[in-house]
Image: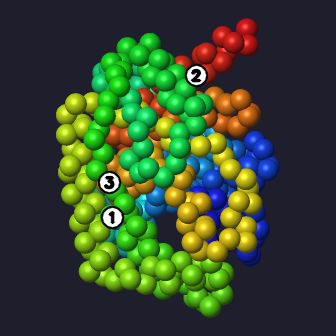
Amino acid sequence: MSMGHTQTDGYGVTRNPHDQSKTPGGSSGGSAAAVAAGLVPVALGGDGGGSIRIPAANCGLFGLKPQRGRVSASPNPHLWHALGTTGPLTRSVRDSALVYDLVSGNVDGDAYRAEPVGSLVEAVDGAAAAPRLRIGVCLTPPAKTGKLHPEHAAAVHRAADLLRAAGHAVTEYDPHYPDPTASFIPQFFAGIRTEKRGVEHPERLEARTRAVVRTGAWVRRPVHRWAEKKGGTIARALDHVWTEVDVLLTPTVPDRPGAADAIAGKGAVRTLLAASGPVAYTAMWNVTGFPAASVPLGTGSDGLPLSVQLVGPDNGEERLVALSSELETALDAGTADETT
């Protein structure tokens, strides 16, 4: 079990290609590391609390967590019930848009379905001519589980300046976040328990994973159903945000990538605590189902990637990929200017 890192007893430690002493994040860190190292052009990840966006942030990739139900979890009815979604990790926004245009959709048996949206590739291609947006900048995390690194705050401000220069209305904004903890924690444990039941040889799971399953034994069906309903209540409480701004701009993760082997030898409780920090800005959007994207934004003083997160309303993926593409273009232009 990885949870914010990517390390298992069976396969060892997965390392960040930018600095092999650091983690690529998790739990889709293997996918992110493979793309960042140039082994493959695209790889799929699963995001139940940030596991597309956190590895994307650590490895300098684009990673979009789509709207809940945008991509089928088939042959399973769901991925971690209401929390989980599936999607690509890529080196460019357009590559992700292309993959989403191919994999989006539903089949019979899907527990969750999203409303149809248009082509994400077309949204990327038309980004420069798209209507200008109201962008709310917020550095406050929905979950108070991590301390914001100053370079991550600076990355958000840099992104705000780039988007303002592109004609968008960018202002500081307070969403007045409800606390997502009571919804997220039971769904998290329910997701792990469900996956354990689907394992052919559960006795072969590593001891830490079995301990996490036991820790979540209190999450029976009524508790899980309550937590999922609570997530819907939180989403509706945040609907006011989308009448006041079109997109939220936030950090993706609070801190710099930690040691690659940070959870090696740790038990369930210490691993869970280690995983709580990276999800401070990401888990809320699994609880609500809103789409959210991690967008690369250069490198920090340690030589590792920086990123920002863009969050949109229900079915707002077109808006997010268009805005992400504008950021990507503006950042590339600035980098070119610095080297000439």
Q: At numbered mark 2, what does the secondary structure look like: helix, strand or loop? A: helix
**Mark 3 = which residue?**
179
Q: At numbered mark 1, what does the secondary structure look like: helix, strand or loop? A: helix
Report whether 300 appears left or right of 327: right
Q: Residue at x 21, y 57 (%)?
A: 233
Amino acid type at circle 2 is: Leu
Q: Position of residue 84 (x, y in %)?
A: 42, 62
Q: Residue at x 25, y 63 (%)?
A: 230
Per the model, the C-alpha gap separating discs 2 and 1 is 38 Å
Specify few, some or many for label 1: CA neighbours under 10 Å numbering under 14, 14-19, or 20 or more. some
Nearer to me, 197 or 152: 152
Q: Which quadrant holds the N terminus?
A: bottom right
Amino acid type at circle 1 is: Ala
Q: Position of residue 225 (x, y in %)?
A: 27, 74
Toward the top, the furthest residue is 340
Colour pattern? rainbow
Number of dots carrying numbers: 3
Specify few, some or many for label 3: CA neighbours under 10 Å numbering under 14, 14-19, or 20 or more. few
The circle drawn on residue 331 is 2
Q: Position of residue 25 (x, y in %)?
A: 63, 53
**Mark 1 = which residue?**
182
Q: At numbered mark 3, what does the secondary structure look like: helix, strand or loop? A: loop
